[in-house]
Image (spheres, rainbow, N blue to C red):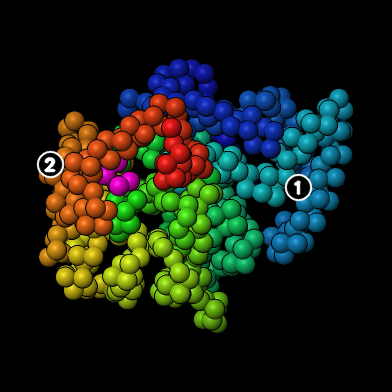
Amino acid sequence: MTQIIERSKEDLAKRELIDRYTITVNNIVVDISIYAEEDKPVAEYVVSITNISDATKIILEKIRQEFISKMDLEEIENMEQNELINIRQRFKGEIRKLIHKYFPKADERTTNMLINYLIEENLGLGKLEILLQDPSLEEIVVNNHKEPVWVYHRKHGWLVTNIRIVTEARIRHFATMIGRDVGKEITNLNPLMDAHLLTGDRVNATLTPISTKGNTITIRKFSQDPWTITKFIKGNVLSYEAAALIWLAVQNELSIIISGGTGSGKTSMLNVISNFFPPNQRIISIEDTRELTLPENLHWVPMETRLPNPEGKGGVTMLDLLVNSLRMRPDRIIVGEIRRKKEAEVLLEAMHTGHSVYATLHANNAEEVITRLTNPPIEIPKPMIASLSMIVIQNRNRRTGRRRTLQIAEITPTGDPRVLMKLNVAKDSLEEIAKSQVIMEKLKLYTGMTEEEIYQDLKEKVRILKWMVRKEVDNVNEIGKIIAKYYMGTLT
């Protein structure tokens, strides 16, 4: 069972309300409030189900207990997925009878809402379903039954919730159920599980005693509302001028590596860059777990790696997909992350043969990117790196949790980085510290434009970006349509 720890009005009155919104889960209205408290370093994410009264909750708990007494939980836990679907339908009928018994005047809509509430509590993920339905959350973390569930919020960073899973057995049950849905198994002999759900969410689970404080579940949610260039600008992640420079580089098929630490927004920036792809080119993306969402008007083929089965067969690696993608006549290739030498070699070879490449790498600044690429385990000859045009460094402030573009750099013919823009942390703004030389020369060579015309083009892009922000064009597909019109010359 999952439990919402109710907060009294007196308790909440002592805190500062910093955010509030509602979500709807199976017709149940859920109020989300985020409170900060002076003597606590972490704010609290408070869940309150507003359209089910306290009296109704008491009766629902009675129905739940009566329902559980008729269930064989161990048998259900070992059922196959198709059997579970059938048992859910049968239990819906049983619960409907109990609801009619205790709520004889309930209409059909209310009855269905209460049925869904009880089914999720007993056969689903309970209150975790609420967290899964909140589009503002990126991560959901269960550490053990003694601690509340933690979440990572897009706007507020790490928050502790008022939801708790009451037993270690229940956490294990949830992990088993998640794994079973996608053909994965977690047991005492195999206490680690990494699973990709059909929704795109990624789930990692561990069992005690491997995780010494208790069973754990970590859910990284697949964003249904992806980051876009306008959201980045409004969130002060990067400036209009930086966005225009990246747009100009993407438009002219210059290859870019995005780097940064864990949770710095590398994949989000990769998604933002894809906003600028033209619809008349073929794009192949390669990821371990599908995280990218490109505009629907693009000619896009997303591909995912696959782990081998228990016999060690059937695995498909990043390198397999990368080599295969070069036979698919791509114009642009997106790679989720560069980890190994062979992957980097194939990517750089793709750049040399005229493909635009966009990839992420773990490194904290432009100098580190070159160091990582030229040293083991990747170890690429430095002159080869000159085929790369731009490095974008993302950063998450460890004190505030804010994500920002830290640096934008170009690559010199010798394979060294030259920083063009750098974050002024004190002013919280991305500032130009050097004029582009290498990118400017490449653009003049490839486009025939003069330097003055290139700067005029950047100004025009800034104007369009400001217009999109002013008109609140945040949807990835709407932005894709506007960019397509721009390339067609029909944007007015």
As helix, strand or loop, the secondary structure at mark 1 comes to helix
Local crowd size for mark 1, using a 10 Å CA cut-off: few (<14), some (14–19), many (≥20): few
Q: Residue at x 23, y 48 (%)?
A: 449
As helix, strand or loop, the secondary structure at mark 2 comes to loop
Answer yes or no: is residue 151 visible.
Answer: no
Q: Is residue 317 above or below residue 483?
A: below
Instruction: State left or right for residue 85 relative to residue 392.
Output: right
The magenta segment? 244-248
Q: Residue at x 54, y 60 (%)?
A: 196
State the image coordinates of residue 67 (x, y, percent, origin top left): 78, 44
Residue 457 occupies quadrant: top left
Local crowd size for mark 2, using a 10 Å CA cut-off: few (<14), some (14–19), many (≥20): few
Q: Which residue is mark 2?
A: 433
Instruction: State left or right for residue 181 relative to residue 439.
Output: right
Residue 113 occupies quadrant: top right
Q: Is residue 245 magenta?
A: yes
Mark 2 against mark 1, which lies toward the viewer? Answer: 2
Q: Count up the numbered dots.
A: 2
Q: Which residue is mark 1?
A: 68
Q: Is residue 393 magenta?
A: no
Q: Residue at x 47, y 21 (%)?
A: 12
State the image coordinates of residue 263 (x, y, percent, origin top left): 35, 49
Q: Main secondary structure of the magenta part?
A: helix
Q: Amino acid at mark 2?
A: Ile
Q: Amino acid at mark 1?
A: Ile
335 or 65, which lies in front? 335
State the image coordinates of residue 228 (x, y, percent, origin top left): 42, 41
Instruction: State left or right for residue 336 relative to residue 59.
Output: left
